[in-house]
Image: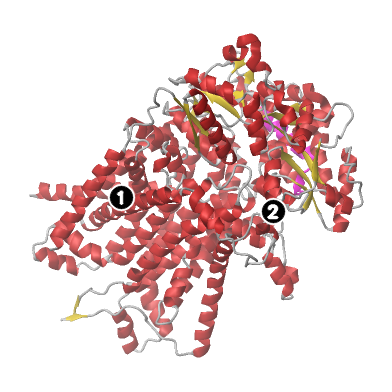
């Protein structure tokens, strides 16, 4: 009796295995007129699907938006698919320009320059220059890529400082007059201490945001050229002006204008705190509009440029393309994909996306159609820059040392001078490696 | 006949070996080869650099060794605090008592919760940054205010706090294994000992402990292996590496792979880590053998 | 003559103080275990705005619609079934394959036995970063990518080493008398394994089942990378969709998490009886 039992079990297993194997379908052999898109933007899936339906109604081409979240899982999936030569028709490359260039060199990404420049460059000209620049490779770029446009921005974003008008007023300041200089900014620390309030919140547990802040002030104190020269190795990191930049972090920490535990914060936590009125300042990107709206529609806040620390050069902010889509160069549907992207980034669709998801449009022709707080962000595009447009990337080891060091400064474990020396040491080592 | 016998024996392990070879050995070789290259994981260009990656890990990467120290601390807390707790709870539950089932279920809830939830909830409970800091409020309210502290945002206490929370999440497994082990000790031995006049402590010392050693060894190995590879919880509680204070090897490997796009280096870090773990297990095994012989 | 081996309690404490202390100990640990789960559960009834502002455990109003939204938006039906299917098949596969192998390692002799076993052990300890990419490429070559069977095989592998280790440890400790008796009765090796070894190892098997079930149930990154088609995705992948890139609807997420945690808790409740019952049919010649 036992034996029949085990035989039955065995038979069931065999059947099951066969059934499962049979379930294996050929990977979505895209039918003649369908385009597959992989993305990571959870909040926008409904909006994307609506646009996809509209497009299908208009042209009969089916567009499938597949969401894979969160973004670092998405990134791994794309890389794995690249290795397996299995990329979809449209996808995004998350990461730095270096990674972008690697994908291009591996032949995964379609060169869109000709489509951009067709019809008197009508597609190219519809975008904010700075947005497109993120997806573009300039002549004589250091990545060895043939100059051209390889991606399409679908929104822009800037990273700026925000302040809570109500709290500011509570502390005795004029809510319409935010701090104009860095000294003013850190001076607020004294009031914060007295009122036992939290100051600046930001996702500085994630080092890239620290990098952004430091970089903004580097541009402000020494100017873009000197910063790029440092990356090229022509100026050392222990130059006094760099020490000055690092010193700003020390100042912020000493004057008490930073929130407690800032260095452990992920951006989501920072957003929660600011949205719930628990912090006066926030350093965040324009995507926060959507977040704050969802958490606290009544929040009274405004966006400002980071208060300048020097009058020598203008303060910079990071801005440019928020998210971009690229076309798979090996796809059988690449022409359809390009056509879809052209429709997708046209004025009306961009306006729709912007309103639906509270993000800034990449298409500059629809500015009049977007909500005012977004317009505040968009206005600062003139000050925007982005590592992806500098034509040169700093080595990751240096970036890591620098950002970790700034974290250490903020918890009082390092001095600006010491950090400068450390970063320079790592920089020298990396430069030597490159010469190898 | 002998041949047939041996073949039958092989058949028992064949499915396991087959699956293992395809799904572990092959990827392992693939990854192993890349630890000798300088590659970002995407571009067609792969530069063979021999042992340079390994040299860098061993001699030029203080952050790697710091992460090893950190993870060793977490593991130490797990081996002592977590497993002691698990064992005591197992002992306490291995008896006739009401609420037995209730406790057995409750203690297993922490392992069941996903690490994301654990990170979020504990952040809320003890973090003064993003949460209500309930523990501090509680301490203040019962007059122990001087113990109130910024557990997670103070670099000095962050790692230990993470270790304790990690133990909270993990003790359920040790509890389960210890309980299973205790359950398989024949009661007759205790009866016989009692008849012989041994008291509870002597029964414990002479029966329970020796018979639990194999299970304890297994728990120790599993604890070490599990804890050394943890990282999701740390991300949930302090966002990441906290300027190196809560850095652990897996986070370092992920940083190399995704953050700085050094796939080859990440592979060599993984191999180094694996070798270290194997060495630790080997030493631990030898030690427990000596203990058993004693 | 066979004697029943009693299991269960091995001593009853007569000392009342000790009893009370023990209970206090148990209860305090239990409270720390329940509180986070309770928080998650209660939060699922709150609103987005109040979830972090409002420290009280119990929400002022119970928003049951969070659960409706979780099920609807998460398309839970399909993903739930997927997760169920994967968990069942992987666990069944691991139980059979690893118990056979562990039994062989424990009881049989064959050339290379120790070497193979140590390789399995070593695998437990050497994590492979980037293994997802390697598995992706591998499955691709085998034409098993984006198929349930491919995922199931990968997940079986994930749990093999540890399960074999746990089972072999147990088999080593198990007294051989019953197996000898069965062999004398003419039982084949497979028969002994199925009729004698497996039933005796129920407590450890229960642990193996729960351990692997938990791993498979909570797994998402491999699934996300291997599967392209949404129809194969497991529950955890769907959960991540509740965590927006920039904005998370926490209460709905908590509802989804609660729904996700329940099956495993139920499985555990069912399995733990076996751990309690333990060995009841062992026989020792007196």
Chain label for disc 2:
B
Residue C161 visible here:
no
Quarter of the image with the N terminus of chain A is bottom left
Which is nearer the eye, B201 or C79? Answer: C79
| Place of residue B141 in the rendered image (x, y in percent of width and height, measured from the top left) | 73, 73
Identity of the residue drawn at 20% across and 60% down: C194
Which residue bears the numbered disc 2?
A: B155
Q: Is residue A274 left or right of residue A24?
A: right
Quarter of the image with the C terminus of chain A is top right
Q: Main secondary structure of the magenta part?
A: helix
Q: Quadrant of residue A8?
A: bottom left
Magenta stretch: residue B207 in it? Answer: no
Mark 2 and mark 1: Cα distance apart in space: 42 Å
Mark 1, other Cα within 10 Å: few <14 / some 14–19 / many ≥20: many
Mark 2, other Cα within 10 Å: few <14 / some 14–19 / many ≥20: many
Q: Is residue C10 left or right of residue C240?
A: left
Which is nearer the eye, B116 or A251? Answer: B116
Magenta stretch: residue A412 in it? Answer: yes
Which is nearer the eye, C229 or C185? Answer: C229
Identity of the residue drawn at 92% across and 52% down: A172
Q: Quadrant of residue B288?
A: bottom left
Q: Residue furthest front?
A: A57
Q: Secondary structure at mark 1?
A: helix
Q: Secondary structure at mark 2?
A: helix
Q: Is residue C283 above or below residue B36?
A: below
Q: Is residue A364 above or below residue B121?
A: above
The magenta segment is A410-428
| Place of residue A144 in the rendered image (x, y in percent of width and height, measured from the top left) | 59, 16
Which residue bears the numbered disc 1?
A: C117
Disc 2 and disc 1 on one polypeptide chain: no
| Place of residue C88 in the rendered image (x, y in percent of width and height, measured from the top left) | 33, 53
Chain label for disc 1:
C
């Amino acid at each position: 009796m036992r034996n029949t039992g085990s035989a039955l079990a065995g038979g069931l297993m065999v059947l099951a295995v066969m059934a499962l194997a049979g379930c294996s379908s050929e990977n979505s052999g895209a039918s003649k007129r369908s385009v597959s898109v992989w993305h990571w933007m959870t909040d926008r899936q409904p909006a994307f699907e609506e646009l996809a339906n509209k497009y299908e109604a208009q042209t009969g081409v089916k567009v499938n938006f597949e969401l894979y979240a969160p973004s670092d899982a998405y990134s791994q999936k794309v890389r794995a698919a690249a290795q397996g030569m299995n990329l979809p028709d449209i996808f995004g490359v998350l990461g730095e320009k270096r990674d972008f260039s690697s994908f291009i060199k591996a032949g995964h990404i379609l060169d869109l320059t000709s489509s951009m420049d067709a019809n008197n460059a009508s597609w190219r000209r519809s975008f904010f220059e700075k947005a497109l620049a993120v997806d573009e490779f300039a002549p004589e770029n250091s990545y060895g890529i043939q100059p051209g446009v390889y991606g399409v921005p679908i929104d822009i974003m800037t990273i700026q400082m925000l302040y809570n008008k109500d709290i500011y007023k509570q502390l005795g300041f004029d809510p319409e007059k935010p701090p104009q200089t860095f000294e003013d900014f850190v001076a607020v620390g004294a009031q914060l201490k007295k009122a036992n309030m939290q100051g600046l919140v930001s996702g500085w547990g994630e080092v890239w945001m620290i990098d952004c802040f430091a970089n903004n002030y580097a541009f402000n104190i020494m100017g873009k050229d000197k910063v790029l020269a440092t990356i090229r190795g022509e100026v050392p990191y222990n130059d006094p002006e760099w020490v000055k930049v690092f010193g700003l972090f020390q100042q912020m920490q000493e004057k008490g204008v930073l929130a407690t535990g800032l260095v452990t914060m992920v951006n989501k936590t920072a957003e929660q705190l600011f949205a719930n009125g628990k912090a006066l300042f926030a350093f965040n990107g324009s995507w926060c509009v959507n977040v704050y709206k969802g958490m606290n529609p009544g929040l009274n806040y405004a966006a400002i440029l980071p208060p300048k620390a020097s009058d020598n050069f203008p303060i910079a902010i990071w801005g440019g393309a928020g998210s971009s889509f690229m076309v798979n160069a090996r796809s059988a549907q690449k022409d359809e994909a390009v056509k879809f992207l052209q429709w997708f980034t046209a004025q009306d669709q961009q306006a729709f996306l912007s309103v639906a998801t509270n993000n800034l449009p990449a298409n500059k022709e629809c500015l009049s159609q977007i909500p005012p707080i977004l317009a505040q962000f968009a206005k600062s595009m003139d000050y925007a820059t982005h590592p992806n447009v500098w034509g040169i990337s700093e080595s990751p080891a240096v970036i890591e040392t620098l950002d970790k060091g700034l974290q250490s400064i903020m918890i009082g474990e390092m001095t600006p001078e010491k950090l400068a020396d450390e970063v320079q040491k790592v920089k020298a080592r990396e430069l030597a490696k490159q010469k190898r | 006949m002998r041949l047939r016998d041996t073949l039958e024996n092989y058949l028992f392990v064949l499915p396991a070996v087959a699956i293992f070879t395809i799904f572990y050995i092959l990827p392992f070789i693939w990854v192993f080869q890349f630890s000798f290259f300088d590659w970002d994981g995407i571009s067609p260009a792969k530069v063979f650099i021999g042992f340079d990656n390994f040299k860098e890990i061993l001699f030029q990467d203080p952050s790697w060794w710091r992460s090893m120290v950190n993870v060793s601390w977490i593991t130490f807390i797990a081996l002592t605090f977590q497993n002691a707790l698990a064992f005591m709870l197992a002992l306490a539950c291995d008896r006739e008592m009401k609420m037995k089932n209730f406790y057995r279920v409750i203690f297993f809830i922490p392992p069941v919760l996903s690490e994301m939830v654990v990170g979020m909830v504990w952040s809320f409970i003890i973090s003064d940054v993003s949460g209500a800091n309930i523990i501090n409020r509680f301490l203040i309210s019962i007059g122990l205010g001087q113990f109130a502290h910024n557990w997670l945002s103070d670099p000095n206490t962050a790692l230990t706090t993470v270790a304790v929370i990690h133990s909270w999440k993990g003790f359920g497994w040790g509890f389960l294994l210890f309980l299973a082990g205790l359950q398989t000790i024949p009661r007759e031995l205790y009866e016989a000992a009692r008849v012989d006049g041994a008291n509870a402590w002597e029964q414990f010392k002479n029966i329970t402990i020796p018979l639990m050693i194999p299970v304890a060894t297994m728990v120790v190995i599993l604890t070490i292996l599990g804890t050394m590879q943890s990282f999701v919880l740390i991300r949930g509680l302090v966002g990441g590496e906290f300027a190196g204070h809560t850095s652990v090897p897996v986070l370092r490997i992920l940083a190399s792979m995704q953050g700085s796009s050094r796939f080859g280096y990440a592979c060599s870090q993984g191999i180094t880590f694996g070798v270290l773990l194997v060495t630790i297990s080997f030493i631990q095994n030898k030690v427990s053998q000596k203990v058993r012989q004693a | 003559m066979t004697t029943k081996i009693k299991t269960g309690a091995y001593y009853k404490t007569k000392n009342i103080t000790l009893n009370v202390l023990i209970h206090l100990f148990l209860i305090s640990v239990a409270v720390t275990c329940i509180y986070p789960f309770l928080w998650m559960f209660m939060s699922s009834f709150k609103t987005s705005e109040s979830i972090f502002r409002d420290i009280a455990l119990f929400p002022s109003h119970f928003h049951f619609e969070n659960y409706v939204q979780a099920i609807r938006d998460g398309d839970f039906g399909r993903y739930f079934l997927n997760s169920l299917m994967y968990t069942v098949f992987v666990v069944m596969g691991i139980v059979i394959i690893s118990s056979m192998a562990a039994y062989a390692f424990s009881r049989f002799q064959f050339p290379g036995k120790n070497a193979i076993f140590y390789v399995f052990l070593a695998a437990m300890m050497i994590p492979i970063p980037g293994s997802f990419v390697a598995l992706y490429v591998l499955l691709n070559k085998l034409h098993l990518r984006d198929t349930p069977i491919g995922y199931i095989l990968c997940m079986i592998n994930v749990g093999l080493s540890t399960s074999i280790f746990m089972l072999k440890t147990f088999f080593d400790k198990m007294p051989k008398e019953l197996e000898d008796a069965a062999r004398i009765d003419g039982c084949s090796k497979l028969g002994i394994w199925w009729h004698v070894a497996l039933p005796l190892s129920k407590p450890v098997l229960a642990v193996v089942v729960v351990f692997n079930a938990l791993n498979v149930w909570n797994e998402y990154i491999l699934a996300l990378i291997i599967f392209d088609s949404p129809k194969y995705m497991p529950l955890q992948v769907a959960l991540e969709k509740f965590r927006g890139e920039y904005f998370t609807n926490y209460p709905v997420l908590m509802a989804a998490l609660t729904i996700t945690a329940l099956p495993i808790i139920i499985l555990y409740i069912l399995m733990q009886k076996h751990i309690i019952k333990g060995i009841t049919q062992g026989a020792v010649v007196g």
